[in-house]
Amino acid sequence: MAKKKKKLSKSGRALLDAILVVSLCVAAFSGWKIYSELHQYKSNDQKYEDLRQAVTVSVPTPSASASADTSLVNDNIDWSALQAMNSDVAGWIRQPDTPIDYPVVYGSDNSYYLRHTLDGEYSIFGTIFVDYQNNRGFVDKNTVIYGHHFSHYDDTMLTTLDYYNDQSYYDAHPYLEFLTPETDYLLYPIAGVVKQGSDAYIRTSFADDNDYAAYVQNFLDNSTFQSNETFSPSDQTVLISSCSDLVQDGRYALLCKLIKAD
């Protein structure tokens, strides 16, 4: 004769009901969070695309046969229109054959633009920005630029920096363009390093050329790729830093030589 199943007590049923309600709430919240982030991604992506169209003007395209030199820079930005949107605009960074194609701003701290777009709206994607400790005009020995990493959102923002962990990626992407209202530059990567968030690798000033050279040498000694570029203490550099998936709480820092374009 089969045994009768024991009925749950009122307290037992109440506990199961509570667990079910909590589980449903967690699932609903998780679903809402995923939807919210996807919506922000699509909105952010469209906003930047609209911005590119609004501030891009037609200029002759550089020769496709040119090598990675100063003749490659194609400054087609309407700076008056861009600065009218936000007076914090510092320039525009882009890299051929990658998603990197964004405005760069100056901030009064290193927090605001982590979560705000060019028009001042809150966004988890933020805006690429220059370290507030740097002087404006790219006159420092080392200028630091920050931007977010979103590997789960189609390599947006500065996510592709992680790919410099592979020599072949450097070989295929040996430079970036950095445009400003006053001067256009090429950024030639000379080293890329994997760091953790707690590592002290950010510097914007140096005691002298020897101090600066030692700082750069540390990057060269630990680089994930071998650069074709040489370095001299008389050079200026730009350090582009973003989060990284390569290690826990990771950062990838790409150190580039700053060269004025013709």
Image (cartoon, helix red, strand yellow):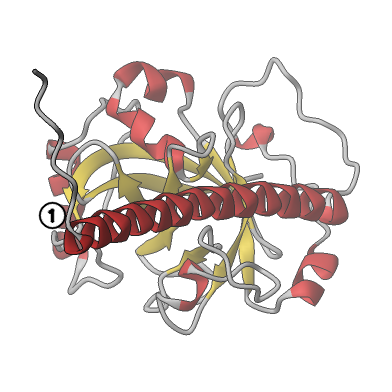
| Rendering coords of residue 196 (x, y %) | 17, 52
- Residue drawn at (28%, 29%) of the image: 165
Q: Which residue lies furthest to the right in this view?
A: 58
| Rendering coords of residue 175 (x, y %) | 49, 34
Give the left or right position of residue 153, taking residue 140 as reference: right
2 or 17: nearer the viewer: 2
| Rendering coords of residue 149 (x, y %) | 42, 47
Instruction: Give the quarter of the image for residue 72.
Output: top right
Q: Is mark 1 on a helix, strand or loop?
A: helix
Please name the residue that numbered disc 1 is placed on: 214
242 or 71: nearer the viewer: 242
- Residue drawn at (61%, 37%) of the image: 70
Is residue 235 something one can see in this rendering?
A: no
64 or 37: nearer the viewer: 37
Q: Name above or below for residue 114 compared with residue 62.
A: below
- Residue drawn at (63%, 77%) of the image: 88
Give the left or right position of residue 35, taking residue 163 as reference: right
